[in-house]
Image (tube, grey):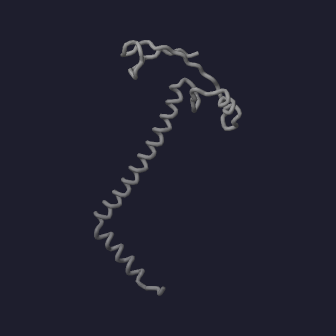
Amino acid sequence: MLKNPNQKVIKRMAWNTLKTNRRKTITLFMAVLFSSFLVFTIFTVGDSYFRLLKIQNIRMSGAAFDAIMYGVTDEQREMCENNPDIALTGTAGVCGWVEKTDGFGRDHGNKIRLKRMRL
């Protein structure tokens, strides 16, 4: 492609346009800056929120573990114990009974209040 000697003219025209429309240029620059900051802040706060939510759920379970599996068979338990990616495994037992229902003594999808005991 042929080279045009108009680069100096284009740069001078662009600079003059920025200087004459200074208020518009600053407004556009600030809009881009603030919108970038807002997007960055939203993603940072969202990421922190979900990390802390995970840690809170782990601590509310009463331990420092990442997963709870219910209804595990002996074969599945042995697979977890032999898996090199799993650092520690353990077993927890929970028992409980129905204390009160909103129905006639039977649960038909009603709210149930359980009395729980940790073993």
Residue furthest to the bottom: 2
- Quadrant of residue 8 in the image? bottom left
Tag count? 0
Q: Is residue 80 left or right of residue 29?
A: right
Give the residue at x 52% y 32%.
55
Give the residue at x 57% y 25%.
63
Give the residue at x 49% y 30%.
56
Q: Is residue 108 left or right of residue 90?
A: left
Task: Name the spot of residue 20 as percent of width and height, x first.
Answer: 28, 70
Q: Is residue 69 left or right of residue 36?
A: right
Relative depth, front residue between 42 and 93? 93
- Quadrant of residue 70 in the image? top right
Task: Name the spot of residue 71 as percent of width and height, x first.
Answer: 58, 26
Relative depth, front residue between 40 and 23? 40
Task: Name the spot of residue 12 as percent of width and height, x first.
Answer: 37, 77
Q: Is residue 70 left or right of residue 1?
A: right
Give the vertical position of 41 relative to 50 (above or below). below
Quadrant where the image shows the C terminus: top right
- Quadrant of residue 6 in the image? bottom left
Give the residue at x 53% y 27%.
59
Task: Name the spot of residue 84 as percent of width and height, x first.
Answer: 70, 37
